[in-house]
Amino acid sequence: MELVFLDYRLKGENINLVIHHNTITGLINDSENTFFDLISLKKMGRGQIIIDNEKTTKDDIIINQKRISQIKDNIKFPSYLNTIEELMNNSFRINNINVKNPIKKMKDSLKIVGIDESYLNHNLNTLSNSERKLVTIAIGLLSNPDTIVLEEPFKYLDIKQERRLFLILQKLVEQYDKTIIIKTEDSETIYKYTKEVIAIKNNNILVHGSTDEVYQRVDFLKRNGINIPDIVYFTYLAKKDKNVKIDYHKDIRDIIKDIYKHV
């Protein structure tokens, strides 16, 4: 799904924004969740929204809301539900999702996120933080959305779990043709795992573009209170203060190779 907002008025600000199809986009400094809800089509303003090159009406937007799964950070499972199967059945019910074979859909959704179908009978109280996140994403897939909007998906995960989740999101983009938006305050994960980034300041778009290009604007981002990834700042200081001719990289090993080559 490609989302385009043209001269869209929201909270007194004029927004022009494109969320490209089949891409992982990062969203930072959205403290009031304004853009998180806007991209999920849950917060409405005035202006034109174009979805997949088609102009939309209010009725179209309501229909297209069902093509988007919004997964928030506060993962809370209802206390009256015991197993993953009960949780998924509850999601079918409250979201009015109708499928021919619910059990198959549950198993398929779990498989996509790397969880065995035997987990359907797994007790919710025994799930680890990473398993809870994966189960929540699997539930978000039950409606077969075109776009998945996640809030702080890497929070509380160690490096191995973080990498595993990224590979799942990458698979959703590359194999299942999904569009992914990640809202997080962690500039390190935004830099490592997204192709495009949207930085917000005072409920307005400060900058939007290629993640690599945006984070190379270190002085501009610093002036506007945007956190700089450590690996970017190290390269910035080496180039500025030591006049070392190295490129910006996402892997420290590539920086070491550059330093060895030029110093």
Image (tube, helix red, strand yellow):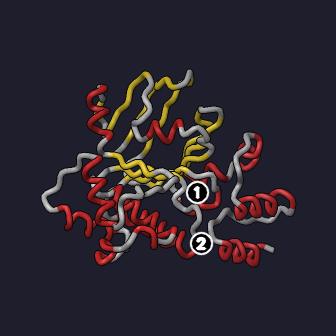
Q: Quadrant of the C terminus?
A: bottom right
- Residue 108 placed where, x, y %? 26, 68
User: Residue most toward the right?
Assistant: 241
Q: Amino acid at mark 1?
A: Ile
Quadrant of residue 201 within the rendered picture: top right
* 156 displayed left or right of 252: left
Secondary structure, mark 2, is: loop
Quadrant of residue 234 within the rendered picture: bottom right
Q: Amino acid at mark 2?
A: Asp
User: What residue appears at the point 20 percent right and 66 percent down from the top-left corner?
Assistant: 103
Crowdedness of circle 1 by 10 Å Cα count: few (<14), some, many (20+)?
many
Q: Is residue 36 above or below residue 249?
A: above
- Residue 239 placed where, x, y %? 79, 60
Report the residue marked by disc 2: 158
Crowdedness of circle 2 by 10 Å Cα count: few (<14), some, many (20+)?
few
* 101 displayed left or right of 76: left
- Residue 146 placed where, x, y %? 32, 50
User: What residue appears at the point 50 percent right and 71 percent down from the top-left corner?
Assistant: 128
What distance separates the C-alpha of mark 2 from that of mark 1?
16 Å
Q: Is residue 107 above or below residue 19?
A: below
Say whether disc 2 or disc 1 marks the residue closer to the N-terminus: 2
The disc placed on residue 190 is 1
Secondary structure, mark 1, is: helix
Q: Is residue 107 above or below residue 204?
A: below
- Closest to the camera, between mark 2 and mark 1, is 2
* 146 displayed left or right of 217: left
Q: How many marks?
A: 2
Determine whether label 2 and label 1 are within 8 Å by CB. no
Q: Nearer the viewer, residue 27 or 253?
A: 27
- Residue 113 placed where, x, y %? 37, 69
User: Residue most toward the left?
Assistant: 100
